Amino acid sequence: MYKRLDEETARKNRGYHEKDDAYRIVYDTLDWVSYDTHDLSPEEIWTEANSIIEELRATPDKEWKAGKLYTQLMRRYDSFMAHDKAPIEPRSDEQRKTTTTLVLYATIWMLILDKKVEKPEDHPYYPLINTILLQINDFPLFDKMLAKTKQDEEFYEKITTHEIQPRDYLVDGAKLFMYTKKDLPVQRKYEIDAEIRDSIIDDRPKVMVEKLRMLQKESREIAIPRGNIQTLCKYLNERYGTNMKPNSFSAAVDTYFPEIK
């Protein structure tokens, strides 16, 4: 059973999601299908897809997990409950398939859009993407959905006034997104707020230290402040839109990258 988001949570989630280039690119496709089929809203679909990304992040064998997603989601969407605890709405197989396809479709684009490659098979997440794709590519509207999203991607790249920043969701996780604890399974319980972004994921400082390692390798092109932990922390927060606290970042540096001090 899936519990629909209340208006306030949906509004907050929408505000977070709209900061995401990938969401903007896929939005019209999700909105078109969900409106025509009376399904979940784009912000609900994107929120569900983000929770899937979090589950994949936490799973060592991501392809195995991905192969189970369709069946798991079909069961999850067998009924909808309104946020005000109105009677449960049972759903047909066709309705469940539509919801499952939309959520997995959004998940695929999160994975696709974090890297630009010449050929699909060159994408670092190609096996994972393909595992998910094979579960939904027989959906009646799939080809039209794909064509529309590709068209929207090209259009968005032409009209956007800022540089599109690829985001590796499997590394960065769900930053900038908001979930409500009571609506999600245990492993999906992330209550995200603008004031506590640094606590989104327990290993955030560790992740940022790994990013610092990567940036150090590019230091010929990028001026990276060194030595002062507060300066380093501020630099990474500004670069990646996070809100790490210097103390937690310092502890992660001591553990994973002491040579930078």
Image (cartoon, rainbow, N blue to C red):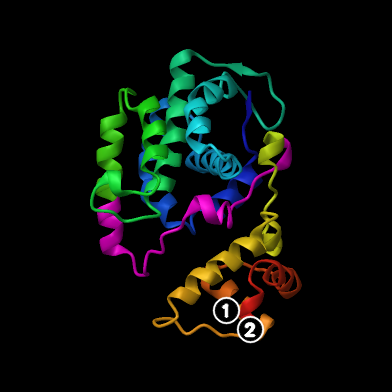
Is residue 38 visible in this depiction of the protein? no
Q: In the rendered view, does 49 fall on the left or right side of 190?
A: left
Quarter residue 21 falls in: bottom left
- Whether tag 2 and tag 1 are in contact, CB under 8 A, the answer is yes
Q: What's under tag 1, amino acid-wise? A: Tyr
Can you say whether 108 is above or below 260 in the image?
above
Q: Is residue 36 above or below residue 254?
A: above
Instruction: State left or right for residue 191 relative to residue 173.
Output: right
Task: Please name whichever residue, 241 or 254, is drawn nearer the observer in this view of the structure.
Answer: 254
Q: Give me the C-alpha separation between circle 2 and circle 1.
A: 6 Å
Residue 113 screen position, x and y as percent:
37, 52
Q: Badge 1 is on which residue?
A: 235
Residue at 25%, 62% in the rendered image:
158
Q: Residue at x 65, y 60 (%)?
A: 204
* Residue at 44%, 21% in the rendered image: 97
Residue at mark 2: 231
The answer to whether one can see residue 106 in this image is yes
Quarter placement of the N terminus: top right
Image position of 173 with respect to 60: above or below:
below
**Residue 64's mark?**
none
Label 2: how many Cα within 10 Å (few below 14, some 14–19, many 20+):
some
Q: Secondary structure at mark 1?
A: helix
- Residue at 61% in and 79% down: 260
Q: Which residues are magenta?
A: 153-182
Residue type at mark 2 is Thr
Q: Secondary structure at mark 2?
A: helix
